[in-house]
Every structure is written in structure tokens, then in C-alpha cells.
Amino acid sequence: MEKQEDIVKTVHLGDTEVTLMGTAHVSQLSVEMVEEYIKTGDYDCVAVELCSPRLENLTNQTWWKNLDIYQVFRKKKAGLLLINLALSAYQKRLAERIGVEAGREMIRAVELARENNIQLEVIDRDISTTLHRLVTEVSFWQKLKIVGGLIAGVFVGEEISEEQIEDLKRGDLLHSVVGEFGEELPEIKRVLIDERDQYMVGRLAQIAEATEAPKKVLALVGAGHLIGMLPTMESPPTLEHLENLDIKPPPSRLGYFIGWGICAFILAMFVVGFRQSPELGEQLVITWVLFNGGFCALGTLIALGHPVSIVAGFFAAPLTSLNPTIGAGMVVGLVESYMRKPKVSDFETLREDIAIYSMWWKNRVARLLLIFFFSSFGSMIGTYTAGASIVSQVFG
């Protein structure tokens, strides 16, 4: 078992003493340590590795009331919500296997701080900013790797050995995972871990520099973050750097240009085909519609979409694939949300349902996101398959 001094470090930021405690988010030992330290009464501030929205979600079980599924699709945030739910599902199943509620040590810290009137601070970057930066700054291939991992975690359910579970309870596994993560997915590690390490140190520095700064702060962060935060504590990020880490950069223009490039190429192939013969031109259009619409409709069917949504996918995909400003998944998702409006009960049970594979297809909110994903993926496959077929017909 890791020694306590390995996961609890004391540093100074100006006149403020900061005790950094590395926790495992599914560890009963971490919960007990949190209780032990806070109950000493030594600390006048408790800082937690949470942002305001995550704190609200952890402590407010009626968070679903604020979720407007129509706006999620209209504002093109369905992908971010799907990733969020997939991460939550994996963490929830892992917690059930271990026997401790995910994030229980953070919840307990918040409870004790409020019960004892101790200053409570959230120091993590807003989850929406982190996910936005992940989507916009990480390469396409690394995105594929993390999406593949999420799909495997949610729908394949890789078994975890008893030894790994015991290591995870103590936090040992988190140390090796961070190292391996950096080697395999460096860009993702930079956004998900390194930037947040810097951000949390910067927030602690802000707390220490406040007019009525606390004398002693207990900062609770994941054991994996503790490793990266300690060196940064010697020279905390400036306010300007902190603001830069909080920026949501605009989407990469590369995907935009690739989308219009595909549009121009396919339209050019149609022109070439019709010039060769009207029959060939018609055949190319039919190929584009059948492949693109067919794969999108198939994806919607796999996600058990409404028949109208399946038809909508078939007709929408050939058009949206020629317009990078709108995706087939968004159109199909909006149609599905109209045909099968999620019920209050779907939102109420969402947290529990996402931990069970079959319930992703039964809960209307979760199924909407599956329909968005599978119809989008189907349209993408259809685009490249149709494109390859069209090229072979024109030049074959």
C-alpha cells in the first residue's frame, strides 16, 4: 500500500500552507482520509478537483431538469454530451465493481466543508471547456483512439482483474496509467491532464493571493494530478496563462476545408459522368444516394431509431455530406427528438441507465445520443464508400 506521505504533500504559496492530497475517485481509503483530515479542524479552506457544473451535478440529483435535449442538438453539443455520458457510464460501473460511489471522496469533502462552515473552493477547469479543447486541439487519429476506447468501455465492458481493483483502491494504478497515457496519447494527455494540472495550481495561487486568503488549505485532487501539480507549485501560472487555458479555441478549419473539398470533388465527378454519358451521370447520383443514405439509415436502425428517423437519415445524408456546416447525425437526432420526446422518467433514471448496456437503447435520452453517433458514423462510411465507387465508375 502506498505510504500516506506519498499521496499527501505540503507546500507554501505565499503565506498560505497548501496540503495536496492525492485521491483515487473510487477508493474507500480516500474517503476515510478526507474525513480524517477535515475533522481535525486544522483547515480554513477545502479546495476540490471539481468545476462548478460538476459540483452541481454531484450534489444536485435533479440536474436533468436543466438539460434541453433539443438545444443540445441545435447547438451541436450532442458529441460532447455523448462523451460525458460514456465516461460517466464507465466510471459508474467501475465504482459498482469496487463498491464505492465514484467521486465519493469529493462529495464527502463538500459535505464536511458545508457542515463545518469551512470555505469551499472548486479549482478545476470547466468540464465543457476541457471537452471543447479536446475536440478542437487533438488530432483526428487520437480522437479515434479515445472514441474507440470509450466504445469498448461502454459496450464491450473490459474485465478488470482483482489485482487492478486493489491497486485502484489505493491509487497505485493511477500513477502508472498517467505515464502510459502520456506515451500512447500525448495530445490528449496535454489537454486532459497537463493543462488541468497547471489550471488547478493557478487557482490555488489565486486563492492564496486573495485579500482574505486562508491560512491553511486542504486541496483534494486525483493521485494522477498530484504528480504533475507538484513541480508547477514552485512557479504557479500567471493570470494571463490561466486565462489562456480557459479559452475555447475556434474549431480547426482543416475539417471545414476537407468537407468542402469532398463536396467539390463529388460534384466534379457528377459533371464528368454526365459529360461521358447521361446514363453514367445518373448512375453516379444513384450510387451517392444509395451508399450515403443507406449507411446512415442503417446506423439509425442499429440504434433503434424511429422509422421516420430512419427515412430522414436516408434522405438527409446525401445532402448533408455535401455541406460541412450541418451533419446527418444532427438532422436525424432532431427528427428523433421530435418523434420520441424523452420523458421526465428518462432524465430521472439516466445516471443509473447508462451503467447498463441494454438501457442505452431503452432510455430515450441515451438512445438519442446513440442515434446521433451511429447515423453520423454511417454517413461518414457512406461518403467514403460512395466516393470510392464513383471514382472507379468514372475512371474504371
Image: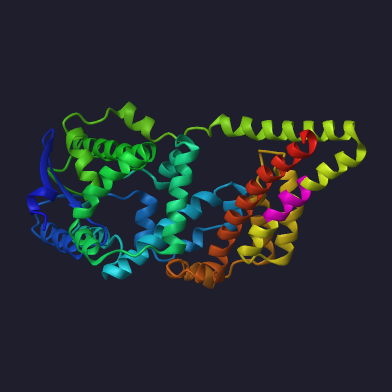
Q: Nearer the viewer, residue 143 or 197?
A: 143
Total count of labels:
0
| Magenta run includes residue 295 | yes
Residue 209: percent from left, percent from top? 20, 34
Instruction: Identify the residue at the far front of this view.
Output: 396
* Residue located at (22% from left, 39% from top): 228
| Prevailing secondary structure of the magenta residues | helix
* Residue located at (74% from left, 55% from top): 314
Above/below status of 346 relative to 278: below
Where does the C terminus fall, quadrant-wise?
top right
Residue 173: percent from left, percent from top? 22, 54
Residue 100: percent from left, percent from top? 26, 68
Tell me the colour scheme of the image: rainbow
- Horizontal side of 205 relative to 306 (left or right) equals left
What is the quadrant of residue 131 in the picture?
A: top left
* Residue located at (44% from left, 46% from top): 145
Q: What is the magenta range? A: 288-296
- Horizontal side of 274 relative to 197 (left or right) equals right
Where does the N terminus fall, quadrant-wise?
bottom left
What is the quadrant of residue 302 in the picture?
A: bottom right
Residue 120: percent from left, percent from top? 24, 51
What is the quadrant of residue 16 in the picture?
A: top left
- Horizontal side of 274 relative to 287 (left or right) equals right
* Residue 221 seen: no
* Residue 373 seen: yes
- Horizontal side of 368 relative to 171 (left or right) equals right
Above/below status of 12 relative to 114: above
* Residue located at (74% from left, 46% from top): 318
| Magenta run includes residue 332 | no
Instruction: Identify the residue at the far right of this view.
Output: 278
